[in-house]
Amino acid sequence: MIKLVRRILWILLIALIIVVTWFAWPRVPIITAFAAKGMCSSVFLAGKSPERVAAEDLSFFPISLAKCKIDYEEKSVTAKVFGLGKRKVVFREGLGAVIVLDKPEEELMADYFEIPDPGYSQDTIPWPLGDVLPEARQEGVDYEKLNTILEEAFDSPEAEAFQKTLGVAVVYNNELIGENYLGDYDAWTRFHSWSMTKSVTGAMAGALAQEGRLDISAPSGIREWEGDDRENITVENILHMSSGLEWVENYFTISEATVMLMQSDDMFSSVTGCQQEHEPGTYWNYSSGDANLLSGLLRKAIGDEDEYHGYAYTRLFHRIGMLNTVVETDASGLFVASSYSYGSTRDWARFGLLFLNQGIFEGDTVLSPEWVEYMKTPAPASDGQYAGTFWLKEPNVENALVDVPDDIFFADGFLGQRVYVIPSRKLVVVRMGYSLSNFSVNDFLRDIIATLPA
């Protein structure tokens, strides 16, 4: 009997080792890459403390299993899980953090880009281009109630993290009427914006189209697709996330998304290798791959690397006062349009304000009104859920916006970052955080709207 029990235990142990080896081990390098990348960007780009990064950006399982070691002199982060799956990330000025994979580390660390000077200081310029806020308040706004709502959006200092809000801002009738931040964060703190970067890329595409440098109705012209069905995919199909490419958007397992973000030096090439699964334009599938395809097409349309790396700043950010926002690149120099930007809450409020005012910012036509309308027009295959890099409906049913005007559209980030634009109420609301599991965006917006003039 004892021999039988021992045999069974050995069989179970061997089975466990096989399961762990088959299922868990391939995922460990993804976990460590995610953790090291998040820590490196948050510390060296956003200026957050490692403790806050661990408690916020990297607080969810299984990412929380990773342990990070920071080299402040080298500006790098190394992460492991139980001493295994080591991944290293290095920081490059002007280009952000990048995972060390195939490109030699010394070459990565030598990469550098000087972000262009905007040519002005926001300290003495009135909102929205600057940070000088008016003393007069907007008529008809219930500021006392609004401030209470903004305070209640945060966890109290002595409580455990629950709502997980980091920063909020409310713009009504072009004025910043309220903002609030967790702890010592403030109006200039950079937060990881995740997929809200996709909407920035949509704006960049519009700027290039406006300049006659990008034809969205034309085939993508991607060389690797010549001679097969993928050559029929248009720029517009990609903008609408209706390329039809095989793609799984899942950050908690091995998927096309995690392979692209965590295991690829060249994310554009990672996506161009995907096979066709549906006829272009007929099937909508939320895809960070399509976003990085678009970034690669913008790179091709611009042609010059320095202009490409500076384009978001000179053509968009600097013209609308987004001076605390940085977009990161992969090892190949591609803007990671799907996921990697860090920006302040006020900056994202300005971004929303640009679209609230049909692409015109303080008299400057940054984007054409026609392009703004295009970016919020439903993609034909999306069943009214998604437009041209903006969302029209919350992707998760539990967050459905049932008590807000139907003309709402918004940018949506992976861990609960949002920029809501409601033209009928002259309203922009920004919420930066690291989860929406216990935060009702519907109630938040509904209550804010109730504080405004009828």
Image (cartoon, rainbow, N blue to C red):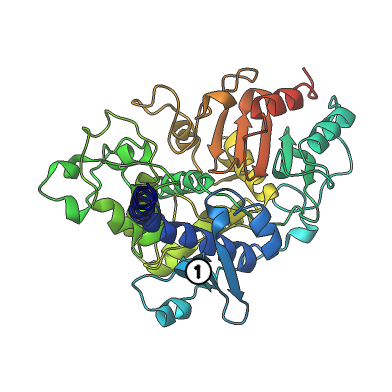
Rendered view: 128 above or below 68: above
Query: Depth check: 16 or 62 in front?
Result: 16
Categorize mark 1 by other alpha carbons within 10 Å: few (<14), some (14-19), many (20+).
Answer: few
Query: Depth check: 426 or 12 in front?
Result: 12
The residue that label 1 is drawn on is: 83
Q: Residue at x 58, y 54 (%)?
A: 64
Number of residue marks: 1
Residue 47 is left or right of residue 312, and the answer is: right
Q: Residue at x 79, y 44 (%)?
A: 180
Helix, strand or loop at mark 1? loop
Which residue type carries mark 1? Gly
Residue with the most extreme front position: 1
Q: Quadrant of the C terminus?
A: top right
Query: Depth check: 99 or 221 in front?
Result: 99
Rendered view: 384 above or below 44: above
Query: x%, y% of residue 125?
Result: 76, 55
Can residue 335 be seen here? no
Residue 408 is left or right of residue 140, and the answer is: left
Query: x%, y% of residue 236?
Result: 32, 38
Query: x%, y% of residue 31?
Result: 47, 57
Rendered view: 65 above or below 128: below
Q: Residue at x 38, y 29 (%)?
A: 379
Query: Depth check: 364 or 208 in front?
Result: 208
